Amino acid sequence: MKNRDDMIIIDDKQIRKLVLHKVMGEKINKADIFDWVLKETGALDTQSTKDDAIVKSTIGVALSDMEKTGLIVKEGSLYVATPKLNKNSKIWKGRTKFLDTIHSLGGYFFEEYTVRLLERYYTMLGYNVTRAERTGGSEDGGVDGILEVIDQFGFEEKILIQCKNRTSSNTITTKEIREFYGSVCALGGTRGIYSTTTRFHCEAEELLHSIPNCVGIDGDAIFRIAKKTGYGIKNIGGEDVIDTQVIRPL
């Protein structure tokens, strides 16, 4: 909302909520937080630079307060949410509800959703997605989806996707990663993405780190990508809301 001087009316609570939302979603530096919050509040649309300065000052105070209370820490130039913030925040509850809802919709839905989510993510990164297909079935060869993409230089990638829709207590094992990687190699994939609503066992994570062309995305990463692409999650007033037009039975 603008006042007579073509400035937005600064709402400290709204700005702090937006900062919280952004820090929870990803590791991020202060400049990117500034840019996003200025855009979200409408400060960039005004001729005055006074509101920009006030918003930036409010963001700085919010970040400082969150550091002092242990809600965030800095890793180099990046702000990172701590477990203390995660488990007591509305955003953490939103993440839990999001993953629980996906889990309730079953494996077929998760396979289809993952393919569409990654299609949007690669498009957002500037890739030309020429194929995005769910392939899961009784004879899927250990692969549930395929993305074929072309990067800005014309290099082509065939990305094979495995999906496991599980509860948080049922982690992905090293055996499952080895089997999936074997399928990626056998089917001529240039990269592999193992997607799950749960998490990876620590040994499975170590194995993934040792494979140069295979990665895992767990429930937290699914949530972050959904927020970043806006596919399955809408941000309303700094809070995450499930988009029921996307997250619904097929």
Image (cartoon, grey):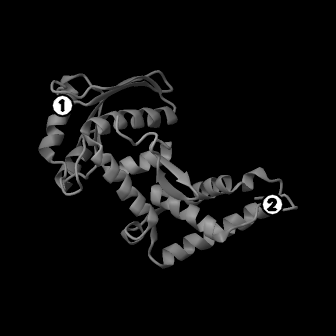
Q: Is residue 154 left or right of residue 48?
A: left
Comparing 102 with 213, the one in front is 102
* Relative to 136, residue 167 above or below: below
Which residue is pictured at 58% across the width and 58% down the height? 237
Mark 2 is surrounded, within 10 Å at the Cα level, by few (under 14), some (14 to 19) or many (20 or more) other residues, namely: many
Residue 151's spot in the image, x, y percent? 46, 27
Which residue is pictured at 29% across the width and 29% down the height? 145
Which residue is pictured at 19% across the width and 52% down the height? 171
Q: What type is the residue that disc 2 sits on?
A: Met
Dot 2: element: loop
Residue 107's spot in the image, x, y percent? 25, 39
Residue 37's spot in the image, x, y percent? 63, 57
Q: Are marks 2 and 1 in contact (CB under 8 Å)?
A: no
- Can residue 165 be seen in this snapshot? yes
Q: What type is the residue that disc 1 sits on?
A: Gly
Comparing 184 with 8, the one in front is 8
Residue tagged by mark 2?
7
* Relative to 127, residue 163 above or below: below
Q: Quadrant of the N terminus?
A: bottom right
Residue 168's spot in the image, x, y percent? 24, 56
Comparing 94 with 32, the one in front is 94
Residue sitting at the far front: 249
Residue sitting at the far left: 175
Residue sitting at the far bottom: 69
Which of the marked residues, 2 or 1, is nearer the chain's N terminus?
A: 2
What's the mark number on residue 39?
none
Which residue is pictured at 26% across the width and 41% down the height? 106
Between the C-alphas of marks 2 and 1, the distance is 56 Å
Residue tagged by mark 1?
142
Residue sitting at the far right: 4
* Relative to 52, residue 173 above or below: above
